[in-house]
Image: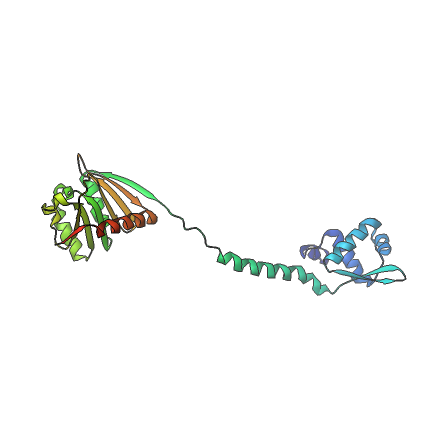
Amino acid sequence: MDVYEKLQEAGLTGNESKVYLHLLKKGESTANEIAHELGIDRTLTYTILNHLIEKSQVSYIIKKNKKIFSCSNPDNLLNPIKAKQVLITDLIKELKKVKHEEKQEIDIRIYEGKEGIKTFYNLALKYKEFCAFGSTGLMFFSTYEMPALAKKAKKLGIKIRIIGNKNLKSQKSFRLKGFQYGFLNIKSEATTSIFGDYVSIHMIKPKPIFILIKNKKIAESYQNHFEVLWKKTNKLKV
């Protein structure tokens, strides 16, 4: 790559590069001399020179009522780069202040039957807290593994709070050790559970069906609702 090509890479046009190199060699020159020696139209030559002046690459003095043009310090070729560097440095600072919106992915799955119950509990046992409201107690009678799962939950130190209808208070499904129960006068056929980033809505009859929703914001919202309901319950700790 020769000097002419490098000047264009540095930000000058082809004609600007020709005039710039010509002035650099000649030292000083009038617009007419440049136009004649380079074979460029006089009007175009003035336009090129004005562009170079705007870019701080050419300056002029007036002698005997004539403009005498000469090249500025070649270091001025760095001026646009320095200006861009300052601009980009400030831009980077601004961009770092911009907070990107957190992408909220949502995953919804539906499970049926006893396999759905197993999937539900295997997932719930991975988290340190489990809350449910609208509990019917029917889950206890749907699988013989329920007492063993309750013991496992207690061994893992999982905090479990369940809200059910006060008319179900005497059922053995609401007497599992290590669980906390709260009771309200609200009838419900569907149970809503919250654990981790999951919300589960399930019904046991006529056959078990589970809707599992994974989304942090949704789980946080349901957890907030649960806490309000929990404060209003009559508590029972087994």
- Residue 70, image x, y percentages: 80, 62
Name the residue located 83 percent from the left edge and 49 percent from the top edge: 43
| Residue 125 in view of the camera | no
- Outermost residue toward the right in this view: 64
The count of marks equals: 0
Residue 62, by quadrant, is bottom right
Residue 10 against residue 168 in the figure, above or below: below
Judged left or right of residue 77, residue 28 is: right
- Residue 85, image x, y percentages: 60, 61
Judged left or right of residue 129, residue 137 is: left
Residue 29 against residue 223 in the figure, above or below: below
Quadrant location, the C terminus = bottom left
Residue 192, by quadrant, is top left
Name the residue located 17 percent from the left edge and 50 percent from the top edge: 182
| Residue 196 in view of the camera | yes
- Residue 231, image x, y percentages: 22, 52
Name the residue located 62 percent from the left edge and 58 percent from the top edge: 84
Residue 80, by quadrant, is bottom right
Q: Which of these two is toward me, 186 or 75?
A: 186
- Residue 135, image x, y percentages: 18, 44
Judged left or right of residue 72, residue 97 is: left
